[in-house]
Image (tube, rainbow, N blue to C red):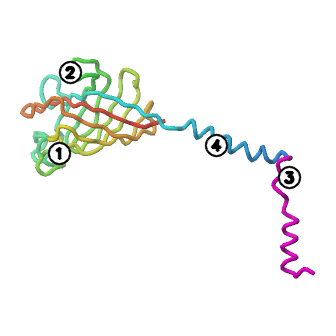
Amino acid sequence: MFSKSSAKHHLAVIAMPSLLSYASTPFLPLLALPILCWATTLRKHKPKETNLVFYIHDNFAGDDTSAMTVAGKDGPTTSILEFGTLAAVDDPVTEGPDPKSKKIGRAQGLYINSQLDGKGLYLVFSVIFTDGEYKGSTLEIQGADPFSIKEREFSIVSGTGFFRFVKGYGIMTTEFIDIPNLRAILKLDVTVRHY
């Protein structure tokens, strides 16, 4: 004879259908369909990696001025080389280091001198591509720029167009610097992942 607890267990085993019985019904394809859909979608959404090299021409003086101090301890006449100074930039972006090379965009945003000794900036700007393969797309750049070091790393935090959902980094190298006239050419070697 069965006890009450073993009888309940025996009935539960009998009442539970076997998995093999589902194989002959339309239920199995219904289970498989979402799994197959998920697997093919996952494969399509692998991130792409793109490498770019371009040049920013940062000019605080001259006929081709593209940056200016907007605030500082002595007002807008304060040098960007002094701690606490804020500058607005709209620098040309080119394919090569020569200022006459093909223009492919603009670097627009802000620099603030955020290092007490004046040798480091904090950058927040957009690279807006106006020509070439990435025309209409942007990269959002943010991070420290200790410009007294020839090569430094920065973050790519966002983007638009071709660079939607982008994340990445770049290496900024000073190709040319004229401190007395506050002119520089910066090489940006960027690696980004996006969809």
Please say if 150 is above or below 99: below
Q: Please tell me which residue is depicted at 22% across the width and 17% down the height of the picture.
A: 100
Say which residue label 3 marks: 21
Between the C-alphas of marks 1 and 4, the distance is 47 Å
Between the C-alphas of marks 2 and 3, the distance is 74 Å
Identify the mark nearer the N-term, 2 or 4: 4
Please say if 190 is above or below 9: above
**Amino acid type assigned to the residue bearing label 3 in the image:** Ser
Q: Residues within 10 Å of mark 4 (few under 14, many from 20)?
A: few
Magenta span includes 12: yes
Name the outermost residue toward the front. 1
Between the C-alphas of marks 2 and 4, the distance is 49 Å
Say which residue label 4 marks: 38
Label 3 residue SS: helix
With 43 as the anchor, is 145 left or right in this view? left
Decide: marks 3, 4 in contact (CB < 8 A)?
A: no
Name the outermost residue toward the right. 1
| Residue depth check, mark 1 versus mark 3: number of the one nearer the observer | 3
Between the C-alphas of marks 3 and 4, the distance is 25 Å
Q: Please tell me which residue is depicted at 16% across the width and 41% down the height of the picture.
A: 149
Say which residue label 2 marks: 99
